[in-house]
């Protein structure tokens, strides 16, 4: 059992957990949080599969880096929208 | 010399890890926010400093000691500030009740 | 030996994520999420991706945790409508099947990687020696340009929706010594990471995130009040990175005939110039995403 398999299992475990929580939760903050966990799980999967006999591949790393930055932008946008939804519900 | 350094590094790291375990135990079992905060900030900073010293001994390079020393300073600094802020928030919240 | 460490780390990641997603207390979930992010950063180091680990720790764990905490106080608690158990069992089964299928698909994917050979044979002419920086700012600079554009679009959305500025409570006397030490150190570390990103793990995004952290310390400590004027300045700096990158792309088109193909021998200078402005711009964008945008008074 190589170490990549361990991290592949961890990554897919995170994806499964996030999916379960996304589907069963009504709280918007927890949904955004599980979206983040989902993206992080996919990042681990990506990088674990990019590791080939001990050497890592630069292109998937660049993609995951881009993905992390895009994720923070999406999270900020989603949270702003969630606050707007709350304000609309008040009126 | 290197075996002495290696053994010293292992001892220091073990002590550091046990400090961190004690801090975690304290956070879990202590009853009050302020006592948990006390356990966390003290044991955490001490444990981290010991681990940093141990890691520097294990690698045997001065470079590592300086870099890890910077990390320890930053963690201690932020630990102190955060502890202060949490205690303040807790006490002012208690005043409101 | 290292396998045992990997197993413990992977188990820790899944356990903290489950703990974070399982609680219904918001602050506890966010704290668990930050811990998960840090453990994931450690496992990314184990997987041989230190640049990504730096970015994940700074942006994914730190800044996202700050954003979530800021919104935790503003969003109303949701009505707790518990779904019937049969629904939850079905979703759990689907989740388990999904994660199993993913793990199996990723593990048994055939084919050797074809990028490492391509990257290493062109690395010498890319202007930097760190392959990740070379890919981000030279070979796939187009993706990075679009990424900055995505950050900018998120900023525009935040401006249109206009959430309230965070109003920090007076935080106490220890913030001043803390800020006095941490903010200069952040500026120094950011410059250092930016410069060393050419040869060892580092780069513009990580440096920008650390600089954003320092600016947040200034803002939350009350030392830099988010007046509309300051926020407009921040907006200008944010725009500057995207504008300079776009202008650089267009001028490479004019100079060498292909978009984002740097002129021969000058690649390092181009990359450094773009990276330096990107760092400032990313720091400004991340800060503005946290504290909202300058308000325009409605006429």
Image: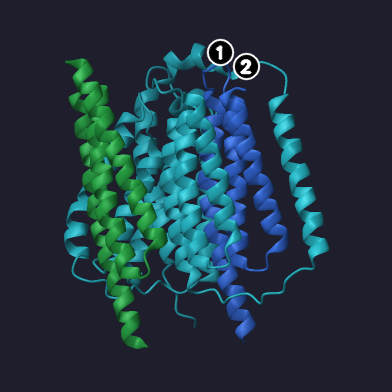
Chain colours: A blue, B green, C cyan
**Quadrant of the rendered structure where residue A6 is?**
top right
**At 25% across and 66% down in the image, what residue appears?**
B84
In-front residue for pair B2/C164: B2
Q: Chain of mark 1?
A: C
Give x and y (percent) for residue B36. 33, 63
Q: Is residue B3 above or below residue C49?
A: above
Give x and y (percent) for residue C259. 54, 30
**Crowding at label 1, few (<14), some or many (≥20) Cα neighbours within 10 Å?**
few
Give x and y (percent) for residue B58. 26, 24
Q: Quick check: do tags 1 and 2 share a chain?
A: yes
**Quadrant of the rendered structure where residue B54 is?**
top left
Q: Is residue C150 visible?
A: no
**At 79% across and 49% down in the image, what residue appears?**
C94
Disc 1, SS: helix
Q: What label sits on residue C117 in the rendered view?
A: 1
Q: Chain of mark 2?
A: C
**At 46% across and 16% down in the image, what residue appears?**
C123
In-front residue for pair C205/C139: C205
Which residue in the protein does label 2 denote?
C114
**Quadrant of the rendered structure where residue B94 is?**
bottom left
Left/right placement of residue A67 relative to residue C41 reads: right
Left/right placement of residue B53 relative to residue A23 reads: left
């Amino acid at each position: 059992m190589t170490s990549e398999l361990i991290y592949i299992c961890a990554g897919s475990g995170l994806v499964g957990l996030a999916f379960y929580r996304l589907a069963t939760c009504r709280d918007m903050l927890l949904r955004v949080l599980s979206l983040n966990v989902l993206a992080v799980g996919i990042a681990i999967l990506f990088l674990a599969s990019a590791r080939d006999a001990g050497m890592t591949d630069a292109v998937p790393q660049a993609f995951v880096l881009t993905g992390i930055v895009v994720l923070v932008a999406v999270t900020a946008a989603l949270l702003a929208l969630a606050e707007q939804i709350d304000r609309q519900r008040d009126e | 010399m290197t075996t002495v350094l290696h053994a010293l590094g292992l001892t220091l790291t073990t002590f550091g890890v046990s400090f961190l375990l004690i801090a975690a135990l304290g956070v879990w079992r202590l009853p009050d926010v302020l006592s948990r905060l006390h356990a966390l900030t003290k044991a955490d900073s001490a444990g981290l400093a010991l681990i940093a010293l141990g890691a520097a001994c294990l690698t045997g390079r001065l470079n590592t000691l300086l870099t890890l020393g910077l990390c320890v300073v930053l963690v201690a600094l932020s630990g102190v500030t955060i502890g202060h802020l949490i205690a303040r928030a807790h006490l002012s919240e208690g005043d409101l009740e | 030996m290292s396998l045992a460490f990997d197993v413990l780390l992977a188990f820790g990641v899944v356990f903290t994520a489950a703990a974070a997603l399982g609680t219904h207390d918001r602050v506890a979930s966010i704290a668990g999420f930050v811990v998960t992010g840090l453990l994931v950063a450690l496992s990314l180091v184990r997987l041989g991706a230190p640049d990504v680990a730096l970015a994940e720790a700074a942006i994914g764990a730190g800044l996202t945790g700050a954003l979530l905490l800021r919104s935790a106080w503003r969003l109303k608690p949701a009505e707790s409508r518990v779904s019937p158990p049969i629904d939850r069992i079905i979703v759990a089964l689907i989740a388990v099947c999904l994660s199993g299928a993913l793990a199996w698909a990723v593990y048994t994917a055939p084919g050797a990687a074809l990028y490492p050979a391509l990257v290493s044979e062109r690395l010498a002419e890319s202007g930097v020696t760190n392959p990740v920086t070379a890919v981000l700012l030279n070979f796939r600079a187009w993706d990075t340009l679009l990424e900055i554009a995505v950050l900018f679009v998120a900023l525009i959305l935040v401006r249109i929706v206009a959430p309230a500025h965070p109003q920090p409570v007076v935080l106490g006397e220890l913030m001043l010594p803390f800020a006095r030490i941490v903010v200069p150190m952040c500026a120094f570390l950011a410059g250092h990471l930016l410069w060393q990103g050419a040869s060892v793990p580092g780069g513009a995004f990580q440096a920008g995130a650390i600089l954003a952290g320092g600016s947040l310390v200034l803002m939350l400590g009350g030392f830099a009040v988010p007046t509309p004027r300051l926020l407009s300045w921040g907006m200008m700096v944010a725009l500057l990175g995207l504008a300079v990158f776009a202008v650089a792309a267009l001028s490479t088109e004019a100079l060498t005939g292909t978009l984002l193909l740097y002129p021969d021998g000058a690649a390092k200078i181009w990359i450094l110039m773009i990276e330096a402005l990107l760092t400032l711009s990313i720091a400004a964008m991340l800060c503005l995403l946290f504290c909202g945008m300058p308000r325009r008074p409605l006429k």
